[in-house]
Structure formats: structure tokens, C-alpha cells
Image (cartoon, coloured by chain):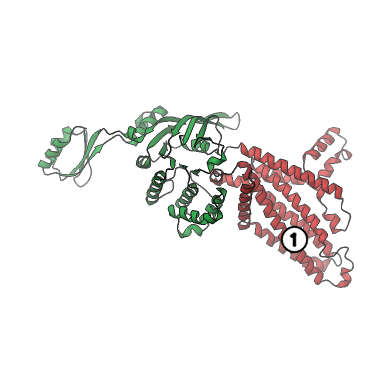
Amino acid sequence: MVAIETDGLTKDYLVGFWRPKPYRALDHLTLAVEPGEVFGFLGPNGAGKSTAIKLLMQLIFPTSGSARILGRPLGDLAVRRRIGFLPENPAFYDYLSAEELLTYFASLFDIPAAERKARVARVLDEVGIGAERRMRLRSYSKGMVQRVGIAQAILNDPEVVFFDEPMSGLDPLGRREVRHLMLRLRDRGCTVFFSSHILADAEAMCSQVAIIAQGKLAAGGRLSDILGVDVLGWELIVDRVSPAALAQVRPQARAVTELHDGRYALDLPPAAPEAALQQLAAAGARVVSLNPLRATLEDFFVKHVAQTAGRETSAL
Amino acid sequence: MSPSAIGKVAVAVFKESVRDRVPYSLVIFAVVLMAASFLLSRLTAGQDLKVIKDLGLATMNAIGLLIAIFIGTGLVAKEVERRSIYSLLSKPLSRSSFIAGKYAGLVLTLAVNLALMTVAFYGMMEYLSLTTDDWIKQGWRAPALDPRLLIPIALIGVQLMMTTAVAVFFSTFSSPLLSVLFTLGVWVAGHFSGDLRNFQAAVDSPAAAAIARGLYYVLPNLDAIDVKNEIVHGLAVPWAAVGVGVASLFAYIGALVLGATLIFNRRDFK
């Protein structure tokens, strides 16, 4: 059984006051997410990511198409006991503390009263909300509200969790913690479906991605297939290199960029870079680093988003 | 709809009201009542009890109305505006339970508010009774601590339940400002229901009279259960009319809450 499946999911909004016209926010989205995956739902701003997630959460209703979560139709309340959801830029009741909010939500999941306190404490610990859990939410920073949002999404130990832009508002430390949390959820067998336009996060965590642009599914697949293993070139960084030595290796490089303090970056073709390395070493240069260049998710993303938008890559 | 989920949402609404601004209304009520009683007891010898009863019931009604309209119209709108509804509706909570819970929560708030105001009201009358000379008390038609006062108070409660249902109904599809205006309009019209029924006596136009009669049947009849004057002045209460009025208002409340859930069940939260 797939964890999440959508079949031709489409959403039109009526735009305009006089003679409103339909605007297609999501166009026949068909997806299947296997259980236990971290699935990255990627796309530029306004691509339709949040629309798709809101459809899955039944916050909006589809114009056509259907979807199932854990094999059940979207309207099934029993499924909601088994899923979690973090909306984009979450907002809660500012007259409650984080502890009170989560206790309220725990009661909606029918978590027994005796268990609620420990459960709430555990998830707040997990997202790094400390003593401030007893303070009213109105005093929280944006990052703290985001953490509370993540806490309420995992409160019921969900089998499938939807995170809409989970890194929004978090500092680098917070982002790393959330990345680790998502991987821990995956290790527990939870399916993590998250939307983002931050490709580094997706590349670090996802086993599968889908790219959406202008409401349409532009591309998708397993990250291992997308990124490939072929080396597309080498990035060599050297310093203490003389002008003569640089002139000697320059014809072998696709590009040479001066960095700082006499340091240079050389973009070498995929063929073995040993010759250039030997020439530079013989001339007294010091190798700082040598890294293989492979296709990145960013390359894949830019290519497919541009294709869908009917634009050249350079225009992005 | 799940009674358990409705109860949980209702308790949350009550908690929000308590932490928000509702307690202030009690303070206002107490201050107004105390100030009025001191002032009037010195100005209207013999009539002070009746005036205070009138004033107390009117104040309860007015404060309850303000709470019902201004909190009622914001109950759903605020959830949508601050987007807290996104997280809430992703939980195992149906939209119908959400609406019914919101309504029940505000009714609970109003009931507690009304109960506290009633205690303050009786406390004030007891104070008046203790500080009034016996020869003045002999002129009172009803005792200060008249248990019959609980009847108009309970009926104010029914009126407020009705007003809350109207406010929640409009708030499921309209902006807070329009919801306030619509609810206020229904409340005013509901108190002039009797006039709508007898409109043909005041105008020559049969069409206008027919429209007025149509409105009489469509709008809730709040006037039918307003027995404040009868109780305060010791007059007979038209129980049959009050009974029919209460029954029709409960039917109206049911229809409004049902209508609100039907509208809300189909609403998109962009």
C-alpha cells in the first residue's frame, strides 16, 4: 500500500470580482509516495506546493481528481489520527502556552489524559522547546512558533507527516535539528512529505522528489537516479601558484577563477586530472582541494522548472 | 458530529473568552449596577427597587448581547484569519464538530457570565434591602430577592443563544464587520417582530403588509419571550406564548447551526 497517492488532483480558483475567471493553481497532479520515505515536494514560490498539501489536508476541495492517504479517502477522520501536518507559517492561539496548546490537540487525538502530559513533554523536548513551554505563545519568536508547529505535527506519532516549508523561520542550528528530526521520523517508519524550495535540505534528506512548477508536475523520481554517479568534471583549488605554472595548465581547464591571496579555482574536464596536478606540483603549487563535480538537484530543478515555464535556464 | 470533540472545542472557546476580555464585562456590569443603585436609591424613594431590577436585567441583556455579537462573529473568522484553523482541522475533528463546539463554547461563556451577573444582581438587591427602611419596603410589590427574576434571566439566556447562533452562522461566510451588522439587524428585527405581524394596521399597502408578514415568519421572534416588564411590575406572564416562543427559537437555533455547518463544510481555506 502506498502512503500517499494523488490521481489527477486539480484545483481551480475563481479570480476577479466581476466576471470571475478560473485560475488553475494545481493541474492534474499524480503522485505516489511509498511508506517510510522522505519525499521532497519541490518547486519555486507560487508553484502550487501549498495548494497540493491543503488539498491533501482537505482545507480546500479539489476541482477534479482524487487522493488517498494510507489507502483511505481524504475525508476519512480515522486517517487524521494517523497523520500529522505542519502548515506553512503556522499560527496558533496566542492566549495558550505551548504546553496547553499541545494538551488541547492531544485531547482531540483522544490520547488518554494520564498519558498526555508525558507525550506533550516528549515532543516539546524533541523540538527543543525548553522552559518557555509554559509561556504564552504570543511571546514566542517566529522560530519558536515553527518548532511548536512541528511538535503538534508529530504529537500523535503519525504514520505520515506533512511539513509545508518546515525550515521557514529557523536559524541554521534549528534547520539542522529539523533535518535530524525528519530523519529520525523516517527511521521510525514514518513517511515524511515535505515541501520546500531549499534544495540543499531536499538533497540532504530525500529518497524521492517531485518538482512542481506552475501547478504542474515538472519532474520527479528517486534522488539516486536524478543525481547519478557520473563525474561531470573536477574543481581544483590551488595556491602558491606561479603565473608560469598557471599559464601551463590553463589550456587544460574549462575555466580558471582567481579567488583570493593567490588562490585559484580550476574547472577541469571529466578526464583524469592527474596531469594538471603533476604540473602544478612540479611548479611548487599547493593543492588545497580537489572535488568531483556531479549533477546536482539544483541543476535538475532549474532545468525542469525552466522547461515547464517555457523559459531558458539563464532566465531564471 | 462527535459530542466529545464538540466538548473539547467548547472548553477551548471558554478558556479563550476567559483569558480574553469577557471578565471585564462583569466588572463593567458590577460598576454600572452599583453606581446606579446608590444614585437611584437617593433619587427615587419607593421606586428604587423596580428601577434597579429594570436596569439590572437590561444591563445583563446588553452585556450578553455585546459578547454574543462581537465574540460570536469573530469565533470562526479569527480562526481563519490567523490560520490556526489549518492545524486544527488536520486533527480528527470534523468541520461540523468544530462549528458546534464553537457555538457551544460561546453559549457556555454566556451562561457562566449570566450566572455571575445574576449573583451580583441578587447581591446588589440584598444590599438594597438591608439598607432600606421597612416603611419603604412595605411599598414594594415584590421582594428584593424575588426568585421570579430568574425567569427573565433564563429567557435572556435563550435570546443570547439565538443571537450567538445568528453570529456564528454569518461568521462562516461573511467578514466580521458584515457579520456584526447582519447579527445586529436580526436582533433588532427580532425585537420588532410583533410590529411586523400587525403591519397592515399601520400601512395601506397590501404588498408592504405581505412583505412584513413574510419577514415576521422568517425572522426570529425575540419579543415573544421578553417578559422583563411583566416580572418587574408583578404582572401575569403569558406562559403559552412564551413556551411557543422558546420552542420556535430553539428550532431556529438548530436550523442556524445546521446551516452554518453546511456552509462551513464546503468552504475552502486558501
Looking at the image, which residue sits at the far left? Answer: A282
Q: Is residue B141 above or below residue A302?
A: below
Quarter holding residue B247: top right
Q: Which chain is red?
A: B
The count of marks equals: 1
Q: Quadrant of the N terminus of chain B?
A: top right
Residue B122: x percent and y percent? 77, 64
Q: Which chain is green?
A: A
Residue A29: x percent and y percent? 47, 30
| Front residue (pair A107, B116) | A107
| Front residue (pair A177, A38) | A38
The residue that mark 1 highlights is: B118
Residue A5 shows in this picture: yes
| Front residue (pair A77, A298) | A77
Give the left or right position of residue A260, taking residue A141 as reference.
left
Q: Is residue A12 above or below residue B56?
A: above
- Please report the residue visible at 67 percent of the width from the left and 41 percent of the height from the top: B260
Residue B178 shows in this picture: no
Q: Tell me the amino acid under the disc marked 1.
A: Thr
